[in-house]
Image (tube, helix red, strand yellow):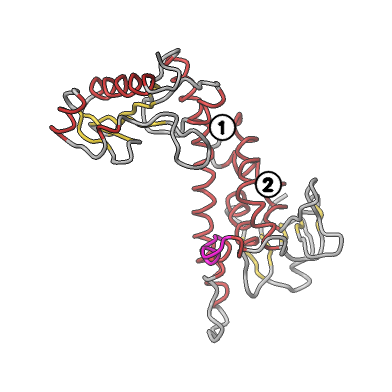
Amino acid sequence: MTTDYLVTHNGGFHADELLSSVILTRLFPEAKIVRSRAPEWITAGPDRVVYDVGGNYDAEARIFDHHQREAPKREDDQPFSSFGLVWKHFGHEYLAASGVPEAHVETVHASFDRGFVLPVDLVDNGALSPSVAGPLAGLTLMALLETLKPVFDDTDPESEDRAFHAALGIARSFVEARVARSAAKLRAEGLAQQAVEAAGASHILELPMGMPFRPAVIKAGADHLLFVVTPRGKDWTLGGIRLNDEGFELRADLPRAWAGLTGEELERVSGVAGATFCHNGCFIAAAKSREAAMAMAELAVAEHLRNLPDAV
């Protein structure tokens, strides 16, 4: 079966068919996007995928609309838009084509569906209002993509298609970046898990580079870890570990005596040669070398343990 056409509706565009087009154009790069409501186009055929138009949902016939009566819903009864339907049936293949390792495809697929696809489905169906974002409502992805439509008095008959294809490129950037970030988090979790194991009973986690590490710490039940030491360019950083997924409270703060100090003054107060900076909020510090960063971390651990309520 050769896919020559990707068929969606003409006129004003929305996020769901734009984002569907991102997925489908990656899988069928030679196919032409046809924006039409003509019956001969929006009817299923062996040479096409039809989405967000056509009044039917039939995966075998490759037609993915959600505007009809008895519109398709998820297992939890939440509605699909065309994006959700396309992601359901083509998402795994898209991720494989994007270079996501086979072992990670299912996890990335579910994460992207939950965090990116579902909100688009809900807003497109009127089940969720962007107004829940308050003052940021106009800056949600769905709203921003729709700002790319031609203005009302642009009478050029080609303006809708030009705007659609311009918006498609922007939408593609967001999808690809979100997928890449999700895949990177899984790679980081593997590296961080190795670092947690290497730390053993130490209160200090040393990472080979900056990366998301908290999921690995939580999964390992490594509640004893207090600080993270990481190389950054020619320098090294020392930071705290957030107590919860949300908020900024840390398991342990850096010593208050270091707050806001830099250079020689920080070296003098901390007693660590090579200490260069400590944020006034005592959540991150920097040093010229690994040895200096580790020394600062050991001092921070010792002070935290001394200040525990049950410390002797």
Q: Look at mark 2 in the image and give the residue it sits on.
A: 90
In this rendering, the answer to whether 24 lies above or below 147 is above
Query: Residue 92 at x, y = what percent?
Result: 65, 41
Total numbered circles: 2
Percent position of residue 48, x then y: 71, 58
How far across and how far down the image is residue 250, in percent? 43, 33
Give the residue drawn at x 21%, y 37%: 261
Q: Is residue 301 left or right of residue 218?
A: left
Q: Which residues are magenta?
A: 133-141
Whether residue 48 is visible to the viewer of this picture, yes or no, is: no
Amino acid carrying mark 1 in the image: Pro
Q: Quadrant of residue 94?
A: top right
**Between residues 204 and 299, which one lies in front from this camera angle?**
299
The residue shown at (52%, 35%) is 244
Res. 127 visible in picture: yes
- Density class for disc 2 (Cα within 10 Å; few <14, some 14-19, many ≥20) is some
Local secondary structure at mark 1: loop
Quadrant housing the C terminus: top left
Are the residues flagged by discs 2 and 1 in contact, CB closer than 8 Å?
no
**How far across and how far down the image is residue 14, in percent?**
62, 66
In the picture of the structure, the residue carrying the numbered disc 1 is 101
Asked if the magenta segment contains residue 245, the reply would be no
Q: Nearer the viewer, residue 225 or 197?
A: 225
**Residue that extends furthest to the left in the rendered view of this protein:** 264
Q: Residue at x 62, y 69 (%)?
A: 13
* Residue type for callout 2: Phe
Residues under labels 2 and 1: Cα distance? 16 Å
Under tag 2, what secondary structure?
helix
Sequence order check: which comes first, mark 2 or mark 1? 2
| Residue situated in front as seen by the camera: 46 or 289 | 289
- Does residue 116 lie above or below 192 as drawn? below
Asked if residue 157 is positioned above or below residue 133 in the image, the reply reads below
